[in-house]
Image (cartoon, rainbow, N blue to C red):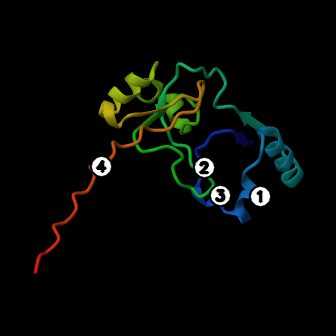
Amino acid sequence: ATICTNSGDYPASWNDGNLAVHHLFETAAKCCEKVAERTGQACDIRDVNEGWDCNKWHLAIEKDDNNEPLHAEGTCTNSGVIHEVWANYAEHYIFPNHQTCCDQFMIPAEECFKADACGPPTKPPSKPPTPVPTPAPIPTK
């Protein structure tokens, strides 16, 4: 049977408007409706967030509409958008808190950003301001 899922793990080419209309749907139920309409076959739904909670942290893999990473490199999140295989090896990919995620992936603290899907939106810290430029000496004649 065809499986419709809410996993963020799909080919980047599906983001193209011509393909998205055939592969990406607002809900898994709408996906299954299309499967039945096109093939007459039944469909299974796999909810990758079933049993998900705010204390499950992993590397961020979300992409925007242009297939660019939604978060800075080195971001740990509890969004639940994971590669499906990660659920089978949770002890290697899913951690109880942000810090453990950073530690397990050996991301230095100052480079490990946090995207808390259960809290208020945050952005990575901005870099410290650069020093004020020193004016170049004016040549004398």
Q: Measuring 68% from the left and 38% from the top, which residue is drawn there?
A: 6
State left or right for residue 103 relative to residue 57: left
The x, y position of residue 17, in whole percent, is: 71, 63
Report the mark closest to the observer, 4 or 3. Answer: 4
* Circle 4: element type: loop
Distance from the alpha carbon under mark 4 to that under mark 1: 46 Å
The front one of 56 and 33 is 56
What's under tag 4, amino acid-wise? Thr
Badge 1 is on which residue?
21
Q: Measuring 79% from the left and 45% from the top, which residue is drawn there?
A: 31
Q: Measuring 86% from the left and 55% from the top, which residue is drawn there?
A: 38
Crowding near the residue tagged with mark 3, few <14, some 14–19, many ≥20 C-alpha atoms within 10 Å: some
The front one of 97 and 28 is 97
Distance from the alpha carbon under mark 4 to that under mark 3: 38 Å
Image quarter in which the C terminus is found:
bottom left
Tell me which numbered mark, 4 or 1, is placed earlier along the sequence. Answer: 1
Badge 3 is on which residue?
15
Distance from the alpha carbon under mark 3 to that under mark 1: 9 Å
Report the mark closest to the observer, 2 or 3. Answer: 3
